[in-house]
Image (cartoon, grey):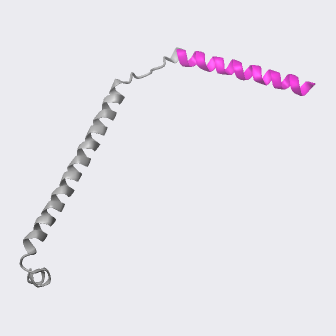
Amino acid sequence: VVVAVVFFGASKIPEIFRSMGRAVGEFKKGRIESELELQQMQQAFTQQSLNQPLVKQEPQDKAKELEQKIQELQKQLDELKKQSNK
């Protein structure tokens, strides 16, 4: 404190501390706003993920889908065999 009085003068000390107090207040305000925004984003994401219906495939649907893929691959294989015989 003595160094500050000598360096800045007695009249400037209160002004310096006021400025420092304002800066700390602005920093805290910014931090709080950032935290609130982050919480809002998390809540929005959570709400959005809760609103999306879960898509569940029945085992029968999966089996049909696999059978279709097998048939498609078999057709492609047959076509390749025909092309290689030419």
Residue placed most toward the observer, 4 or 47: 4
- Compared to residue 70, the image places residue 1 above or below, namely below
Q: Is residue 63 magenta?
A: yes
Residue at 27% x, 38% y is 40
Helix, strand or loop: magenta stretch: helix
* Residue 2: quadrant of the picture: bottom left
Q: Is residue 80 left or right of residue 36?
A: right
Q: Is residue 44 left or right of residue 22?
A: right
Q: Quadrant of the N terminus?
A: bottom left
* Residue 71: quadrant of the picture: top right
- Compared to residue 31, the image places residue 77 above or below, namely above
Residue 22, percent from left and from top: 15, 60
- Compared to residue 26, the image places residue 82 above or below, namely above
Residue placed most toward the observer, 6 or 30: 6
- Compared to residue 30, the image places residue 20 above or below, namely below
Q: Residue reaching furthest right?
A: 86
Q: Quadrant of the C terminus?
A: top right
Q: Is residue 76 magenta?
A: yes
Residue at 59% x, 18% y is 65
Residue at 33% x, 27% y is 50
Tell me the magenta residue range. 61-86
Residue 6, percent from left and from top: 11, 85
Q: Is residue 3 left or right of residue 81?
A: left
Residue 49, percent from left and from top: 36, 29
